[in-house]
Image: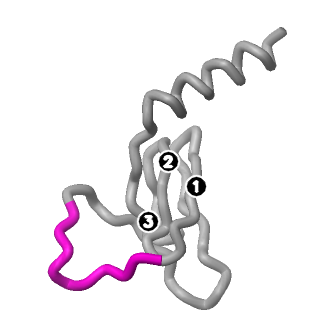
Amino acid sequence: MRRFSESDVWDEPLYLAGESAPPGHYQEVASGRTVYQDGEDRLPASLDGHVACYRRISCTWQQIKGGEANQKASSR
């Protein structure tokens, strides 16, 4: 697990657990756990006594294509 220091630079905003966030994929900074929200909702707590901090991540083309294939297969 990578530890971040005060000198690390972030281009994107950070979201705290319980904060309302737009739809998308999010990664918890401390654990690397990913969360997907299909609509605007509150981000989940870490459930380990620590405040969860999330950053928004973008999908790769392979992940997007895989999602499209899964949607086509489930619609049959």
Residue topped by disc 2:
25
Residue topped by disc 1:
35
CB-based contact (under 8 Å), mark 3 and mark 1? yes
Residues 38 and 19: in front is 38
Dot 1 falls on a residue whose secondary structure is: strand
User: Is residue 48 shown above or below 26?
Assistant: below
Q: Residue 70, which numbered label?
A: none
User: Is residue 39 shown above or below 74?
Assistant: below
Q: Name which quarter of the figure residue 49 lies in.
A: bottom right
Dot 3 falls on a residue whose secondary structure is: strand
Is 3 included in the stretch rendered in magenta?
Answer: yes
State the extent of the magenta-drawn residues as a range: 1-10
The x and y percentages for residue 56 are 39, 53
Q: Is residue 49 left or right of residue 5?
A: right
Name which residue type carries label 1: Val
Residue at the bottom extreme of this rendering: 49
Label 2 neighbour load within 10 Å: few <14, some 14-19, many 20+? some
Label 3 neighbour load within 10 Å: few <14, some 14-19, many 20+? many
Q: Earlier in the sequence, mark 1 or mark 2?
A: 2
What is the distance, in whole Å, between disc 1 and disc 2 at their CAs?
Answer: 6 Å
Residue topped by disc 3:
54
What is the distance, in whole Å, between disc 2 and disc 3 at their CAs?
Answer: 10 Å
Name which residue type carries label 2: His
Q: Earlier in the sequence, mark 2 or mark 3?
A: 2
The x and y percentages for residue 43 are 54, 62
Name the dominant secondary structure of the magenta segment. loop
Residue for point 60% across, 66% down:
44
Q: How is the image coloured?
A: one colour
Dot 2 falls on a residue whose secondary structure is: strand
Name which residue type carries label 3: Tyr
What is the distance, in whole Å, between disc 3 and disc 1 at their CAs?
Answer: 9 Å
